[in-house]
Image: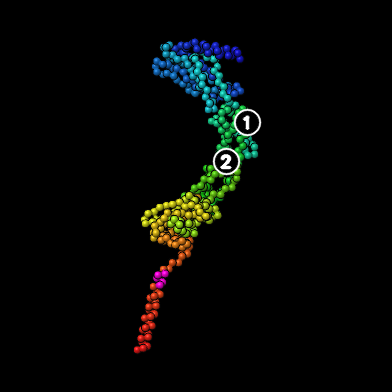
């Protein structure tokens, strides 16, 4: 150890004091090891050095070189500068492996015979097996960006840096099975290619079968159901199209194998429409929204609104839930004005239903008098109309007129008798 430190200090001091000659030629040998001093194959090595200055070529970088099974690579750099004052003697070595780059600068003619680079890397052995545990031979395997093929025992060998979890994958029956593998030391890991079954049904909100187009990965099927056996992916890409509607269900076959895709085709229902005038003379519209089919998506509360028109001006207000019903308020409509309104309700899949009606705002009536129900309704169920309040002055006049007619008739008949 002390001897190696002495050699390093000797070379460093010589490099500090020495300068290279114009037109130098230097051979550089690079050796790359893992964390346990085992050679790393296929590490990328480049050297950047001065070609010359006078002719304007400046610094150049060699083409990438790759370490062999012994972890070594050797190359020669040639400088063509003729003027000693312009020659530059630095050579920068870049070594990259599995996404990690190490850099070192040496002086031409004054460096170690072997420039050694060590990475915090370890061996990773991947074994690919099928669902029965039998080895999968000849399968493409990947660890991060490095690729290999399993041997007859289903094994593939890699050297990986200990930086993040290794992204490992094996290709089996046309599908890519991937896994994140933690590597802190030499690691052996088994990738098991399980097979799954998928059963999928397509129905409407009444649980009636629907003929649809069903895509499972690269395969396409037609009908109201599909059964796919022995698929290697736990999360296949599934897409279901019915008419202009498309759904992409999240499928995880490692959790369950049976799925139902529901297309809600029926709009919600609007019923029990009624109008109430509050003490502040605001008009409150109350109604019920239901989505009654057994597999319906249900009303979308934020998409339930009331639009109303008074004297040619239209406004829209949101509905809110009150006492198990929906309600919307129209602030102090003018007395004797005709309010035309439209209730719009959507379910969670966008099916829309509208109901219209109108209401004549009466002058303020004494406390306790009920207001009139809305007319129109277009599918709503207004309450029975209340009877109109009778005028007592009109009743007295009618009595007087009746008595006068009876008196005239009596006098007429009496006159006839006396004559």
Q: Quadrant of the N terminus?
A: top right
Chief secondary structure of the magenta portion: helix
The residue labelled by disc 1 is 188
Magenta run includes residue 295? no
The x and y percentages for residue 295 are: 54, 53
The span picked out in magenta is: 392-396
Q: Is residue 170 visible?
A: no
Which residue is drawn at the image coordinates 55% and 19% (left, top)? 116
Task: Decide which of 344, 320 is in the foreground and name it.
Answer: 320
x and y percent of residue 231 in the render?
A: 58, 42
> In the figure, 33 relative to 6: above or below?
below
Q: Earlier in the sequence, mark 2 or mark 1?
A: 1
Residue shown at 45% from the left, 54% from the top: 329
- Residue 181: image location, x then y, percent: 59, 33
The label shown at residue 233 is: 2
| SS at badge 1 | strand
């Amino acid at each position: 150890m002390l001897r190696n430190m002495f050699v390093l200090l000797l070379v460093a001091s010589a490099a500090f004091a020495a300068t290279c000659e114009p037109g130098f030629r230097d051979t550089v040998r690079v050796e790359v090891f893992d964390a346990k001093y085992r050679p790393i194959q296929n590490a990328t090595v480049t050297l950047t050095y001065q070609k010359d200055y006078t002719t304007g070529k400046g610094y150049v970088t060699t083409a990438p070189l790759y370490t062999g099974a012994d972890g070594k690579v050797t190359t020669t750099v040639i400088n063509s500068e003729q003027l000693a004052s312009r020659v530059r003697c630095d050579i920068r070595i870049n070594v990259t492996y599995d996404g990690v780059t190490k850099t070192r600068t040496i002086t031409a003619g004054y460096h170690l015979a072997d420039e050694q680079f060590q990475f915090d890397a370890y061996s990773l052995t991947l074994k690919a097996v099928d669902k029965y545990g039998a080895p999968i031979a000849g399968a493409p395997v990947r660890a991060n960006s490095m690729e290999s093929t399993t041997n007859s025992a289903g094994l593939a060998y890699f050297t990986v840096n200990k930086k993040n979890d290794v992204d490992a994958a094996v290709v089996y029956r046309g599908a890519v099975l991937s896994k994140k593998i933690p590597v802190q030391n030499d690691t052996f890991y088994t990738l098991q290619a399980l097979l799954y079954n998928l059963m999928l049904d397509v129905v409407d909100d009444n649980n009636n079968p629907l003929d649809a187009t069903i895509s499972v990965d690269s395969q396409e099927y037609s009908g109201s159901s599909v059964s796919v056996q022995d698929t290697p992916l736990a999360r296949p890409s599934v897409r279901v199209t019915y008419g202009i509607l498309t759904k992409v269900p999240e499928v995880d076959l490692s959790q369950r194998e049976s799925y139902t895709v529901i297309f809600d085709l029926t709009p919600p229902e609007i019923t029990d429409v009624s109008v109430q005038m509050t003490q502040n003379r605001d008009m409150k519209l109350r109604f019920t929204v239901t989505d009654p089919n057994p597999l319906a998506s249900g009303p979308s509360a934020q998409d339930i609104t009331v639009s109303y028109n008074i004297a040619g001006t239209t406004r829209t207000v949101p509905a809110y839930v009150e006492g198990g019903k929906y309600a919307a308020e129209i602030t102090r409509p003018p007395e004797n004005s005709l309010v035309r309104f439209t209730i719009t309700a959507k379910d969670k899949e966008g099916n829309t239903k509208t109901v219209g009606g109108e209401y004549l705002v009466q002058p303020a009536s004494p406390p306790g008098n009920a207001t009139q129900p809305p007319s129109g309704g277009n599918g709503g169920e207004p309450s029975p109309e209340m009877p109109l309040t009778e005028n007592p002055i009109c009743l007295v006049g009618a009595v007087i007129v009746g008595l006068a007619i009876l008196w005239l008739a009596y006098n007429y008949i009496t006159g006839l008798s006396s004559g």
